[in-house]
Amino acid sequence: MNKVPITLMRGGTSKGVFLRKKDLPTLDREIEQFLLDIMGSPDPNQIDGLGGANSLTSKVAIIDKSSNPSYDIEYTFAQVSLYDQMVDFKGNCGNISSAVGPYAIAKGLVSIEEPITRVRIFNTNTKKIITAEVEVEDGRVKTEGDYSIPGVPGSASPIFLSFENPEGAVTGKVLPTGRSIDFLSCSLGEISASIVDIGNPLVFVRAQDIGLRGDELPEEYSKEQIDLLEKLRAAAAEKCDFSSKSEATRISPATPKLTVVSKPFDYQDTAGKFHKEKDFDVLVRMMSMQRPHKVLAITGAVCVTAASKIEGTILSEIIDKKSNTILIGHPAGVMETIYNELPLSIKVGRTARLLMEGTVYTKSHYGQSVI
């Protein structure tokens, strides 16, 4: 058994365990089992660990202070599976990224400037820089404020994330297949799709092409519909060379993310609020670890925004506007992103909060006892 210091944080619409890199097992081969151990996986209920029985709450951030003058913090994201003996390190989580700046400030890992501390974060998964703008007051992260985001109750101080040069985050290519439109085979035939890797690899399909409306809420999908979406995602994973389509659910369950899109129309979100067609630019429904996402991944919003500017993609057909502000309708409401080019960056507003600091006890013993 090991005793390991941890911090539990909410970042945007996700929640995760934050660890210092120095507190991981010394042997690389033990790290995956260590993370499964502390989260209580594999188990859909994660009853014997810190996970929250949902892909949005089965996340880990590994933090290290950087010696590179170009950035302040090195951050590795881990998506811990609920169902399989595996941890996915392929992509990043934008929501968890929003808590990295506040964590670094609270732990004294960066120099503080008031009223805004800018934290330069190097995400090791994607080899990309994220700049977090965090409000600071009296030497501490400011938590109170009137900024709210769909999917999180109440309001807080805003945190603005700028995803810099996010192109080819995982595959090294904006269009992993070299095409703006690919065709994915399923029981419905050949389905048009756009596979785009900006922030994270996403595979976009039109709702009407696969028998969906586009405004479905997470609990509305049938098992057959979820299975169909996973088959399409698996076919895209094969085209990205992540795995064969038969092995994609096991080997690459989080990447790429299947994303259903449609033109705007009036819809009702999970809180019962109605959104008018004129108040957003695109409807988006994303899958996360083979389940419907209850909100929208921030790296997903980054990709949606950037893909809308790429000629020939499904997103460019739907979002036909010159403005650099994009409004995305998702299950919990509407998210705003800002597109900047030369160099490319996408800015998104989030909130975050430190929830708990303490010690987790592992079931097994790993390379070193850290306390």
Image: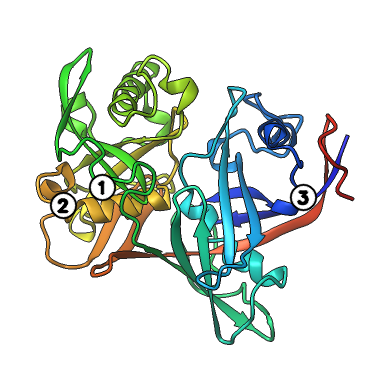
Q: Which residue is mark 1?
A: 174
Instruction: Please tell me whether mark 3 sits on a helix, a strand or a loop.
Output: helix
Q: Position of residue 38 (x, y in %)?
A: 74, 37
Report whether residue 300 is seen: yes
Q: Are marks 3 and 1 in contact (CB under 8 Å)?
A: no
Q: Are marks 2 and 1 in contact (CB under 8 Å)?
A: yes
Where does the N terminus fall, quadrant-wise?
top right
Residue 310 image label = 2
Q: CA distance from mark 3 to mark 2?
A: 42 Å
- Give whichever of discs 3 and 1 has the lower sequence position: 3
Q: Which residue is mark 3?
A: 23
Residue 354 image label = none
Q: Residue at x 20, y 55 (%)?
A: 281
- Along the line of sight, which residue is nearer the eye, 3 or 82? 3
Q: Residues within 10 Å of mark 1 (few under 14, many from 20)?
A: many
Q: CA distance from mark 2 to mark 1?
A: 9 Å
Amino acid tagged 2:
Ile
- Give whichever of discs 3 and 2 has the lower sequence position: 3
Residue 5 falls left or right of residue 173: right
Residue 10 falls left or right of residue 309: right
